[in-house]
Image (spheres, grey):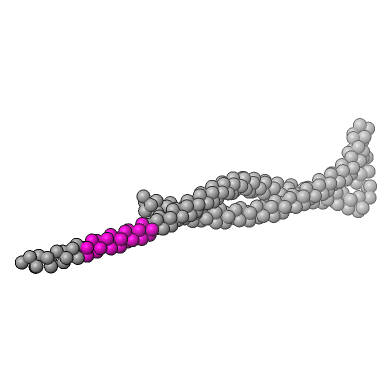
């Protein structure tokens, strides 16, 4: 029995040493694993922080782009409002010129009728004088009942011829003036219509630019919303 006990003691010592060594080895292995995990988490955290900074930068840039785009849209809206006012004014002027031209044409037509009537009357008088000479005038004068009536008839015949010639000249002059005025009105109307067409084209171009800017704004806001969501997600991951 004593011999057996003597043999057991070394075995226990060996086992104890083996357990101790094994425990130390496991502790060292566990420490290495923990160290690796810690390093991995640190790297992941560093990566997340870098991504957060990147998304913060993108978000800031999107906000700047949004402000710039909003300013541009506001400018286009104000420019469009002024353009619409100008177009409405040009249309009013076009309508006014069209009315003036119609009135001028009506006046010219009336003068042409007056001119035709005066010309016909004057032509009849000239034909009468050419055909009968001054016989009719002399008969008219000699049939006067008094000297006063004779004087009146002489003045009448004289003034009749002079007045018809004067009337003709005045009507012709008025007609010529109205025709010149009508031509100026026509030129002004053409100019107004050309300008109106140009401004209408510019308004259409402004509308296209406005549509493009609004689409750009929608895209920027969509990116901004996406960046904010990603930023929140990564911030939570860091926490």
Question: Looking at the image, which is closer to me, 120 or 67?
Answer: 67
Q: Is residue 116 left or right of residue 89?
A: right
> Residue 2, percent across and down?
7, 65
The answer to whether residue 157 of the structure is visible from this angle is no
> Residue 169, percent across and down?
86, 46
Seen at 51% across and 56% down, the residue is: 215
- Based on the picture, tell me whether residue 21 belongs to the magenta stretch: yes
**Image quadrant containing the N terminus:** bottom left
**Main secondary-structure element of the magenta-colored stretch:** helix
Seen at 88% across and 53% down, the residue is: 127
> Residue 91, percent across and down?
64, 48
Question: Looking at the image, which is closer to me, 91 or 203?
Answer: 203
Question: Looking at the image, which is closer to me, 15 or 101?
Answer: 15
- Placement of 174 over or under 19, stated as above or below: above
Picture quadrant where residue 18 is located: bottom left
Q: How many numbered circles does the render carry?
A: 0
The answer to whether residue 12 of the structure is visible from this angle is yes
Seen at 46% across and 55% down, the residue is: 50
> Residue 147, percent across and down?
93, 32
Residue situated furthest left in the rendering: 1
Q: Which residues are magenta?
A: 17-40
Q: Is residue 56 left or right of residue 151?
A: left
Seen at 75% across and 52% down, the residue is: 187
Question: Looking at the image, which is closer to me, 45 or 237?
Answer: 45
């Amino acid at each position: 029995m004593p011999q057996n006990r003597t043999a057991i003691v070394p075995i226990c010592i060996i086992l104890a040493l083996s357990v101790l060594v094994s425990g130390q080895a496991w502790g060292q292995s566990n420490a290495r694993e923990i160290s690796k995990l810690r390093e991995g988490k640190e790297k992941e955290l560093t990566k997340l922080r870098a991504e957060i900074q990147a998304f913060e930068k993108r978000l800031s840039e999107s906000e700047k782009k949004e402000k710039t785009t909003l300013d541009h849209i506001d400018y286009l809206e104000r420019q469009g409002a002024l353009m619409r006012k100008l177009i409405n004014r040009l249309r009013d002027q076009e309508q006014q010129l069209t009315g003036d031209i119609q009135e001028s044409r009506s006046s010219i037509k009336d003068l042409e009728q007056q001119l035709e009537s005066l010309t016909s009357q004057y032509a009849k008088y000239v034909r009468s004088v050419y055909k009968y000479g001054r016989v009719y005038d002399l008969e008219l004068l000699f049939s006067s009942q008094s000297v006063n009536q004779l004087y009146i008839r002489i003045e009448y015949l004289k003034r009749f011829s002079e007045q018809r010639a004067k009337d003709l000249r005045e009507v012709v002059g008025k007609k010529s003036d109205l025709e010149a005025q009508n031509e100026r009105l026509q030129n002004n109307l053409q100019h107004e219509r050309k300008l109106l067409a140009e401004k209408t084209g510019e308004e259409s171009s402004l509308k296209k630019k406005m549509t493009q800017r609004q689409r750009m704004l929608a895209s920027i806001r969509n990116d901004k919303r996406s960046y904010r969501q990603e930023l929140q997600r990564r911030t939570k991951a860091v926490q």
